[in-house]
Image: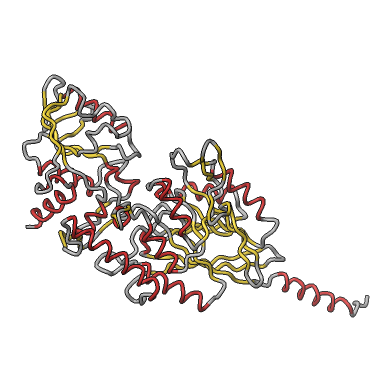
Amino acid sequence: MKKSPFVPLLLLLVVLLSGSCRTYYTAQFFAINDTYEIAPLANGTIGGMARVATAYQQEKAKQPQTFFVHAGDFVSPSVIGTLRNEGRRIAGQQMIEAMNAAGVQYATFGNHEFDIDEADLLSRIEESDFQWIIANLKHKKEGKTAPFVQRGKPMPASVILQTDKLKIGMLAVAIPVDKAYADFEDFYAAAEREYQLLAPQCDAVVALTHLELAQDMELARRLPGLSLIMGGHDHENMYYKVGKTVIAKADANAKTAYLHRLRVAPQAKKWKVNSRLVAITPALADEPKTAAAVQKWQQIAEKSFSDMGFNASEVVTVTREPWDGLEKSVRNAPTNLSKLIVEAVKAAIPEADAAIINTGSIRVDDKLEGNITQYDIVRILPFGGGLSKMKITGELLIDVLEGGLKNKGLGGYLVHAGITQNTNGEWLIGDKPIDKTKTYTLASTDFLVSGKEFNLGFFNANNPQITDLQIFTDKSDIRSDIRKVFIRYLQQRKN
């Protein structure tokens, strides 16, 4: 039987058409997350928003279709944010100005965006040149719920990014925070709804998230059509794949950034993601505009530090192993850092039988290593506050310790010195069980004994089981500032 002369031509046409369906077009994402400091850390060896800006510009020069995104946690916590400028708390102004200068284009909320007052947060949103996006959060105001507003427009749940050849949908979701003015929806439901809206309109859909890794992985399982999840919250760089979906997070404080090269074949509905971790080191020159913004706020901070009696650049100690100040660590178990701080409190009041502090006072949410400066100490304990000394009954002390256990995962979780708990659940001071009928001398902080901590409202000056309460407020006494107490303790250990 003769073969038709048209068969080879038809096969060639099929191959050509198939090839055209697999033509890939490229877009890039330059992603950072959990940035609390605008200047380099560790004696200038890592991070710095001016270097981040340079890294972004270098990548954009090579691939103009590059989008700069931030996966949440930037207005707080930071040392500079706790200071005052022109009579008002800075509350994240420095980071917004640095991010504007660096060229950030899109950002979502992290849990720490809610550390500052509602009015300050609304101001930071208005000051942002970049677009905030969030799918699972609305603003509660005057009994009504509506999207947050930025520059007179409702904040979008997602955006569609347009390149020369591609339409890429980007949705954003964040971990819930308990604030009266914040109405959080289930982030899975919000992401699924937004994905269903974006997918028919776009060649690919990506997500900007501030969730725990396990939640990001579950999101990828629920939405296998997501090409890429750019996350935050976990603070350490990571890269995973769930099915075809890439999940990646950079290191906190811009020690690194992630560059994601997304290649999409629109007609075939295929995608590929190639990701590269970019180290932010002194090899990157400072971008001038961002460097100017950083320098401005550093000068403001240095004056404020000096006024408070701190020498920001002075090295206090050198760590032999990283200090774990991550929020998820200190609020769930004692860490080497939290134990050092409470030991410093006990040492400052040598007559104390024991000492306790709430770990919510530790706000660095990072790991620190190498040279530790006075600036780092203020990063760790930005709110300061004085120590307290009191006589307390054993009965009340046990209640306080049990209340602290109920706060596991929260800022009211307690860490203590001079106190242990045996396998039977008994609380001990030294090697003896706490006697409910006995009175002990306890060192703590002014905040903790205010009764304002969750599950510890009974621990306050009006409780008759507390006597001889002394709050250290005299500025000539270093015990009026827990940061100075910690600095002195570390200096004495070093010597």
**Going by the image, does 434 lie left or right of 106?**
left
Which one is in front, 8 or 335? 335
Colouring mode (rainbow / by chain / secondary structure / one colour)? secondary structure
Furthest-front residue in this view? 86
Residue 385, how many percent across, how many down?
Answer: 21, 44
Task: Tell me: 480 left or right of 451.
Answer: left
Q: How many marks?
A: 0
For residue 259, above or below residue 9? above
What residue is at 36 percent from the left and 75 percent from the top? Answer: 286
Q: Quadrant of the N terminus?
A: bottom right
Q: Position of residue 470 (x, y in %)?
A: 12, 35
User: In this view, which residue lies farthest toward the top?
Assistant: 437
Q: Nearer the viewer, residue 237 or 19?
A: 237
Quadrant in which the C terminus appears: bottom left
Which of the 4 image quarters holds residue 169? bottom right
Q: Is residue 448 left or right of residue 185?
A: left
Q: Residue at point 70% right, 56% down?
A: 200
- Is 273 rendered above or below residue 489? below
Q: Residue furthest right?
A: 1
**Where 161 falls versus 136 (above or below)?**
below
Residue 269 is situated, as x and y percent measured from the top left of the image, at 68, 62
